Amino acid sequence: MKKLLKKIIPKTIIYKYKLYKESLKSKMNDKQRREHISNKYYEVYNKVLNWNDPKTYSEKMNVSKYLNSNNIKTKLTDKYEVREWIKEKVGEEYLIPIIGVYNSFEEINFNELPNQFVIKCSHDSGSVTIVNDKNNIDYKKLANDYNFYMKRNLAFEEFEMHYLDIKPRIIIEKYMGNALRDYKFLCFGGKPYFVWVDFDRFDNHKRNVYDMNWNLQRWNQRDYGNYEKEVLPPTCFEEMKRIVDVLAKDFDHVRVDLYDIDGKVYFGEMTFTNGSGLEPITPSEYDLKLGELWNLDINNKE
C-alpha cells in the first residue's frame, strides 16, 4: 500500500508531510518520546518493550536510541566531521576523497564538477545519489530532493537522538564506481563479532552474515535470504578487521561500515542505531544471542 501511495502522491507532498510529522515529534517531551519508541517497537515485534531490563538486541537498540545522544556519537555519525577522527585513528588513506562541501544545494556549481561524482548529506541516512553522467541529471528533481534532505532532522523520525545536533551539509565525493562491496561489521564491547555483505540491493536483495572466521551464519537482519553462490572473503579482510578493532574500541556497540574497492579498504560510516532497532533479527532466537553480547548501561542517559 505504501509503495502504491508513493507512486500516486507527488513527492513534494510526501516531503511536506514528513517534515510536518517531524515538527510535531520535535515538540515531544522525554516521556512522549519513550511512549513513541514503545509503540513502534510493539507495532514491529508484537511485544512490550522492557525498558528496565532489556534482553534482546532489538530491545537494547530501542532503549539505546533514547540514551544515545552524547557528543562523540554525534560527531562520528556526522559524515563530514567523522573524517577528521578517521584520519587520526587509522589514516587519511582510508577516506574517499571529497570534491566539495556545501551548506545548501544552491551553492553547488555543477559546471565545476567532474562528469561523475556522488552526492550525500552529512546528517541523515539514505540521501545518496550516484551520478554516472551529469549531463543526464534532472536538476529540478535533484534540487527538490536535497532541499528536503537539508530540512530534515533524523532525531525526530524514530528518536535516534544522537542525530539531533548534526549540522546539515551536502557532501560531494569522488566517484569510486557502482560495484562497491560494502562490509558492515557488528561490534560489541569494542570488538567485531559479525560482518554482513549485501547483494543485488535494487533487484533481488540478498544478505549473508559471517563471523570473523568467515563462517556463514544462520541469522539475518530483516527477511533477506542468503546469496546462492559461494562468497569468498575479500582479499583485504584481515586489514579490515584490524581497522575495525581500532574504530570500535571505545564503544559498547557500533556498526562499522567499510568498502572494498579493487582490494583497497575505504571507510563508509559509523552506525550506532543499526536499523533503528526496527529491523527484526531472524530467526528470533538470535535476537537474544546478539543481545547477550551487548553490555548496555540502561542507567546512563548520555
Image (cartoon, rainbow, N blue to C red):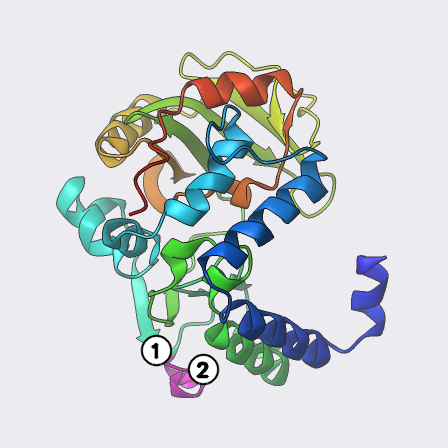
Viewer-closest of 20 and 209: 20
Locate residue 235, reporting x and y percent.
38, 24
Disc 2 is placed on an element classified as: helix
Disc 1 is placed on an element classified as: strand
Residue type highlighted by circle 1: Tyr
Give the mark count.
2
User: CB of mark 1 within 8 Å of CB of mark 2?
Assistant: yes
Residue 232 seen anywhere in this rendered image of the structure? no
Q: Which residue is mark 1?
A: 102
Number of residues whose C-alpha sits closer than 10 Å to that of mark 2, classed few (under 14), some (14–19) or many (20 or more): some
Locate residue 94, reporting x and y percent.
26, 44
- Does the magenta run of residues contain 295? no
Q: Is residue 191 left or right of residue 3?
A: left
The extreme bottom residue here reads 106
Quarter of the figure with the N terminus: bottom right
Viewer-closest of 215 and 16: 16
Q: Which mark, by number, is residue 105?
A: 2
Q: Residue at x 56, y 14 (%)?
A: 216
Q: Which residues are magenta?
A: 102-112
Number of residues whose C-alpha sits closer than 10 Å to that of mark 1, classed few (under 14), some (14–19) or many (20 or more): some
Locate residue 195, reporting x and y percent.
46, 26
Q: Residue at x 25, y 27 (%)?
A: 245
Distance in Å between CA atoms under marks 1 and 2: 7 Å
Q: Residue at x 62, y 30 (%)?
A: 207
Q: Is residue 41 left or right of residue 8?
A: left
Viewer-closest of 171 and 113: 171
Q: Is residue 30 above or below residue 149?
A: above
Q: Is residue 232 above or below residue 249?
A: above
Q: Is residue 284 left or right of residue 62?
A: right
**Figure quadrant of residue 107:** bottom left
Locate residue 67, reporting x and y percent.
38, 46
